[in-house]
Image (spheres, grey):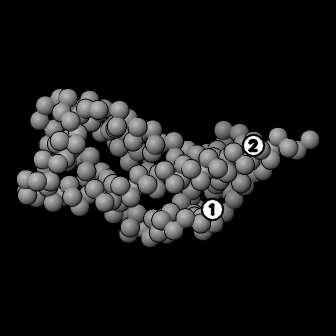
Amino acid sequence: MVTDTISTSCILVILSQLYMPGLVFVSLLALDIGSHWLQMYRKVLLSLGNMPTPLDLCCRTFLTGKTSHKDVKDSTNWLFKAYYGNRMFMGYCSVTCEVLYLILFLIAEKQSESLVDVVVSAVHQGSPLSFLVALSLFGWATRQMINVIQMKTAADVCALYDIEKKQKP
């Protein structure tokens, strides 16, 4: 998991230098890291009931009987449950996300190209790479939606925790 995160981070930073606007790739990196961090923090808050220490942030999810932050039995979002509940679907989305990033790296011809123009051009070419781009876009989009859902639901729990904490004497 750490290797995957680091390699994804590196390729997103490289892509941010190859395409315009580069902020798109930096934002995807921030969304991925931020959503996972908030999800872990949320699990810790729910299990502890008070402000966690750094050690709690690293270990508490596992100490409370959860096998990982991917344990979403208590989630109400159908897409979130489908993604984390079906390892094949989650694997498809993760792999296609990485494949899309690698293809974007391979087809970059010159710096400062428009990302949209390159993707549209690649899809219209009818080559095997264009088929892979089209196939990867669904998994990539699903993965980004999951990150947004994960971030929002975790942030909601953190906000409710803060409100409840302020109301206690």
Q: Residues within 10 Å of mark 1 (few under 14, many from 20)?
A: some
- 61 with respect to 134 (left or right): right
- 129 with respect to 20 (left or right): left
Circle number at residue 162: 2
Towards the viewer: 20 or 106:
20
User: Which residue lies under the disc numbered 1?
Assistant: 66
Please identify the quarter of the rendering in which residue 24 is found.
top left
Q: Residues within 10 Å of mark 2 (few under 14, many from 20)?
A: few
Q: Position of residue 132 (x, y in %)?
A: 19, 58
The reply to whether residue 44 is visible in this rendering is: no
Q: Is residue 68 above or below residue 164?
A: below
Q: Is residue 14 above or below residue 85?
A: above
Q: Residue at x 16, y 42 (%)?
A: 118
- 27 with respect to 18 (left or right): right
Residue furthest to the right in view is: 169
Towards the viewer: 51 or 122:
122
Q: For the residue labelled by badge 1, is the local secondary structure a helix, a strand or a loop? A: loop
For the residue marked with disc 2, what is the amino acid? Answer: Asp
Q: Residue at x 47, y 69 (%)?
A: 82
Circle number at residue 30: none
Dot placed on the residue nearer the N-terminal end, 2 or 1: 1
Q: Position of residue 84 (x, y in %)?
A: 48, 64
Q: For the residue labelled by badge 2, is the local secondary structure a helix, a strand or a loop? A: helix
For the residue marked with disc 1, what is the amino acid? Answer: Lys
